[in-house]
Amino acid sequence: MAKHHVSAIVNNDPVEFLCDTEQTLLDCLRDELNLTGSKEGCGSGDCGACSVLLDGRLVCSCLVLGVEANGKNIETIEGMATGDKLHPLQQKFLEHAALQCGICTPGVLVAAKALLAKNPNPTETETRYWLAGNLCRCTGYDKIIRAVLDAAAEMRKGA
Amino acid sequence: MQERVKGPKYNIIGTRPIRPDGVDKVTGRAKFGADHRVAGQLIGKVLRSPHPHARIRSIDVSAALKLPGVKAVVTRDDFKDQASEFVPAGEMLINYRDVVRNIMAREKALFEGHPVAAVAATTDAIARAALKLIKVDYEILPHVIDPVEAMKPDAPLLDEEMFTAGVTPPPTKPSNVAKRVEFTLGDVDKGFKDAEVVIEREFNTKPVHQGYIEPHACVASVSEDGSAELWTTTQGHWIVRAHCARLLGWDITKLRVTSSEIGGGFGGKTVVYLEPVALALSKKAHRPVKMVMSREEVFRASGPTSGANVRVKIGARKDGRIVAAEAVLKFQAGCFQGSPVQPACMCAFAPYDLENVKVVGYDILSNRPKVAAYRAPGGPIAEYAVESVVDELAETLKIDPIELRLKNAAKEGTKAAYGPKFGPVGLIQCLEAAKESAHWKAPLGKNQGRGVAAGFWFNIGGETTVNLQLNEDGTVTLMAGTPDIGGLRASLAMMAAEELKIPYEKVRPIIADTASLGYNFLTGGSRSTFSSGMATVEAARSIIKQACGRAAKLWEIPEEAVTFEDGMFRPAGENAGKFQPMSLADIAKVAGKTGGSIVGVGAISAQGAAPSFGVHIADTEVDPETGKVSVVRYTAIQDAGRAIHPSYVEGQFQGGAAQGIGWALNEEYIYGPDGKLQNPGFLDYRIPVASDLPMIDTIIVEVPNPRHPYGVRGIGETPICPPMAAINNAVRKAIGIRMFELPLSPPKVLKAIKSAKKA
């Protein structure tokens, strides 16, 4: 079957790609657009390593079809920093040592960014429940939660 | 968070700089196993057995080969059989006779998911279509999943030629019991006669998976002259090279292996699954081949750790002194022998200074994937059972559980039941820290209980090479070969900078490939910061020595007359003050004119790895309506020897605790009567998520290891040993009922609460 032509905005850049009907947005990002920052940990929406923002909404890109991205605005981990300046979440993750192996980190960061856009002053519990869809096997989440809360505090100061 | 563990004796050791690989990991730039692609690559897929036990009569791949886009198919016929021989792999042993059968089924498929054939094709869809065209003629055989069932004389046999080793007289009939091991110290029968209290209990645990978030993945490219490149996510690329060269019959030098960033391993990436298959496919197809496992494949066909049946008997005097300890451990190995029952036996009673110990272990085959190492392989299972009985002993004798452990704690000079005498160890310090902690003294709420447990792991050293290049501007490139999973590059750069008296940022560490650096054993056994750290220090000291030589040459004075202090090379003795001091950068700038590049190599077999003891405190709250156990407060205390980068030491404590909490409360492999795994996904195999856990407090105890230049002990594995018992003991306090089986899932706990009410 012929491939579908998809036009979208990814990290503020216009992109076009061809994809099969069954190809996921995650596979399109990784294989067609070479944006390998989003990871596949499960392919079933359970681990959150593929988290991206689709028109501002947090989704598992493994559960979205590539064709569904047509005309949409997509934000991935690759678009989080501005030039040389890391996003406060990225900076706090480094300072708090909130990553060990780092495979879940892109998804956690994208999800945390979505949380802070909705709720700039989350409690620890709110943060834990928001990130419950992002599995991390290395850290026990302690330093991740601390980094998100610290980044939120800093962003509130800056706002 | 302890700001700094020790006083500022060092400039850099003990501080918390940002890891060198950090920015790449928060921006999505870091390349993991599945992130690599090469021009012209094919996609490789594996056909797996749908049966837990079946003889393979024939495999017909002709239809698959005819499908347009299919470039190669491999089966058992593409791998030469291997002689039976055990070789060390991490803290476990492997046998190539079994490895060649594990990567591709030979006579029989031995578990559901066992690879039977593999295809390389131009697209993922064609590869999947080709798998459906392969015809395998199976003779289905009866299967056995449960280890106790597998031990019975009439159980279906996985290996008709397996006679139990380690029993006298040798058995005359084959069985699923691969071996019996025994460790004894003193005389347990006499010990139990002297006991005033004896407690004997039996425990059961289920297999659990390492649960790394990154599935296995690799890209293999074999050229027409037989040289090959392999990119893979692994804990040890020299080990991968050795295994693949052996399985394929190639010269080691033909194979260059690069380790990608690794998305978690926990022991599970110390073995090969896809790599030899991808290489064989690439050789046949004359094209690069990329293979990535799905999550379901990871669960079905990569190693979980053993489930086990453990009986523990402890005898003590009324004052709490343990006089005899005995344990029998029956471990599932999966479909080939080699469960971690031996290390489990060795560490069962290691936290205690005992005179009379007997531990017997059995290694049992069943129709499950072959187990792989999982963080302190075997330790958590044995220590869960022992530490639960120790807790019951304390309760029976009405002694505080920390006090009881202090009365029996192993210390410097204690002879462990498994052989060696301990050097300086920190168990007593950890117990004292636990006793003094705010957590131990805090009040508990309704339906809550507090438990404590100790943990132990041996830790290893081994072959290690580190290369330090002094660059012409005075910066340093550090090449290590133990894959960095949790901050290793930061720790190594810190040790190099401390030795060379240069800023941390001036050292750039990388993980080198197998063609660029001398041999390195894998990242496992909590060895990488210990061993690669030791090799880094040796390489750095070599650079200083060479630099002294260069300064001596410039100043035309003897090498011994040059000193290195505070980062400066100075003339000493009668030449003191005669020449301007030089920095390492000054010497680097003129290296070309004074003898060429300055390179320090540390090529060692690291000796003197020291064990690490830990103590965990867990508070649990049990919902009496549902039986759900929540961990509401947790503290992990452990002897790190010396914390090079305290944040990553804390991270190991916290991560091990979280994995242990998952093991205690949720995680288990569930098989149906058909011998098939029913929960091969993260939805049904539920690892702890952020909302399941509290903050995990840490206390780093430092009893330096005298055999390491900075006092380092391995710390990665010990933290997974205490959690199951700490939680089991806490649940006992919360509901007044002692449980003997993991996981402590809500239905099981609820049932116990209900039957206690009836009684």
Image (cartoon, coloured by chain):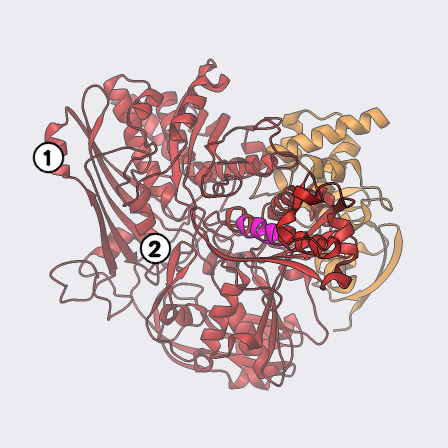
Chain colours: A orange, B red
Q: Amino acid at mark 1?
A: Lys
Q: Say which element carries label 1.
A: helix
Looking at the image, which is closer to me, B126 or B225?
B225
Q: Identify the subunit bearing mark 2.
A: B
Residue B219 position in % (x across, y down): 62, 69
Q: Quadrant of the C terminus of chain B?
A: top left
Label whose residue precedes the other's in the sequence (1 or 2): 1
Kindly identify which residue carries mark 1: B190
Residue B103 position in % (x across, y down): 45, 69
Looking at the image, which is closer to me, B584 or B556?
B556
Q: Amino acid at mark 2?
A: Ser
Find the magenta span and give its range.
Answer: B534-542
Instruction: Give the prevailing secondary structure in the magenta stretch.
Output: helix
Q: Residue at x 71, y 60 (%)?
A: A27
Identify the image quadrant of residue B673. bottom left
Left/right placement of residue B8 relative to residue B640 reads right
Q: Between marks 1 and 2, how big is the CA–CA gap?
A: 31 Å
Residue B339 circle label: 2
- Residue B578 in sight here: yes
Work out which residue is located at the far front of the displayed protein and give it: B574
